Amino acid sequence: MGISTKPPSGMRDFLPAELAKRRYVIDVIQNVYEKYGFLPLETPCVENLTTLLGKYGDEGDQLIFRLLHRRDKLSRALEMPEVSEKDLADLGLRYDLTVPLARVIANSPELPKFFKRYQIQPVWRADRPGKGRFREFLQCDVDITGTESLLAEADVCSAVAEVLTKLGFHNFKIHINHRQLLKELIKTADIDAEKEAEALVAVDKIDKIGFEGVEKELEQRNFLPEQAKKLLSLIKRPENFSENQEISRLKAELKDNAGALKAIEEIEELCRLLNFGCAQNKIEIDPSLARGLGYYTGCIFEIRSSDFGGSLGGGGRYDGLIGMFKGTKIPAVGFSIGFERLMIVLEEKGLFDNLEAGPDILICSFADTDCADVVSAAKIIREAGVKTEVYPETPKLGKQIAYAESIKAKYVGILGATEAQNKTIALKNLSSGEQLVLTYEQAAQRILSEK
């Protein structure tokens, strides 16, 4: 039986046409992030397990890809009388981009107090693959550290909203909640503090299994039926409520709870700020939003669109995470775009229909054409900024043109001995069939003018 040529489950090869689409979207994201003043950062794909573990909750910890010890260290571990998982690995693949950022901040005192960074890199999760769900996938994060101001939340939400708008999305909402509000709602449902994390895990599945499904799961997790019903009645927003009506409902439900009222006021102020920026009319207060990761401490947010079932990205405030590394409190807030799901929706919307990965021109030649003349022509056309490919052999011209069409080149440049002597090329538009004899420089300008 031969060796399988498929990549590992949940991981993919990206051929040129697909990569052209991904790079187009990355360019849009990067340009918007930089316009907002975010600076690029990259971190290693491998982190110490001590850095990763304990930051994502119990379920998240189980999804970290662990790397076995190497050579002698692995041999010694395997020779131990009782071997546990922690004896076999001390490194893991990056699970997200937020925890590595926290480590970098703690390790880099030269960074500015208010550090605005964006990071576009792959992460890995030992999850079950599905539509839009992979074991290796790209994340596109923006984060601001060093400030508790809600202007930071407004900045990251506005940047993400502008990215989606530039990519042609209009039918989306940024759902907003607050971790402290959610905690107080859990407490109001008479659920003990030690079972709070378990309740959050169940609530985080509302968008997947619905309120009835979460109610059943809470009961399966040994919550009392009355606790489950009360919690879900508190977090379920009535249909057709405006944002102001929902704020009023929450204030009435929690009128004697100072911690909850403070959280509601932060949500209210964030909504006010966002209505002055690129997220105007794109906001939905959602008390059921949980965001499963354990490190969130304040406002949390998630992008939802009726064009796609599930989240297109999310984030929130995580004031305690960086302090876990540094020993002092450093406030931070961030937003991550779900790049892979975004790509699926954009493909379905037909955004990439006119996006081609092929060269602008394929230079064709004949047996009597000096290869040096081909190289010279390609050099001049490339220097003008034209994507240029050279057909490396000299079969019949029809075969070369057929190849140009197969790779979706826009033009062919036909170079014979006479053209080469005159420093000209026969430029043929493969769409219109128009053919002109031009100098190399003129051919390049013609191509650029029609791009």
Image (cartoon, helix red, strand yellow):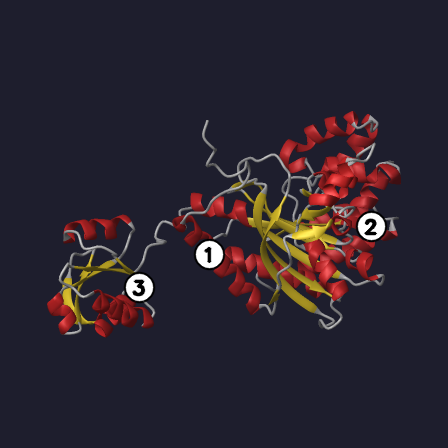
Which one is in front in this view, the residue at disc 1 or the one at disc 2?
Answer: 1
The answer to which of 337 and 398 lies nearer the viewer is 398
Which one is in front in this view, the residue at disc 1 or the one at disc 3?
Answer: 1
Q: Are marks 3 and 2 in contact (CB under 8 Å)?
A: no
**1 or 2: tag closer to the N-terminus:** 1
Residue drawn 66% across and 66% down? 116
* Residue that label 1 marks: 23
The answer to which of 63 and 183 lies nearer the viewer is 63
Label 1 to label 2, Cα distance in Å?
Answer: 43 Å
* Residue that label 3 marks: 451
Q: In this rendering, does residue 280 appear at all? A: no
The answer to which of 232 and 309 lies nearer the viewer is 309
Q: Local crowd at mark 1 within 10 Å, few (<14), some, or many (≥20)?
A: few
Please tell me whether residue 44 is drawn above or below residue 421 in the rendered image: above
Q: Amino acid at mark 3?
A: Lys
Q: Is residue 182 left or right of residue 127?
A: right
Label 3 to label 2, Cα distance in Å?
Answer: 56 Å
Q: Residue 146, image x and y in percent?
A: 75, 67
Q: Amino acid at mark 1?
A: Arg
Q: Is residue 379 left or right of residue 254?
A: left
Which one is in front in this view, the residue at disc 3 or the one at disc 2?
Answer: 3
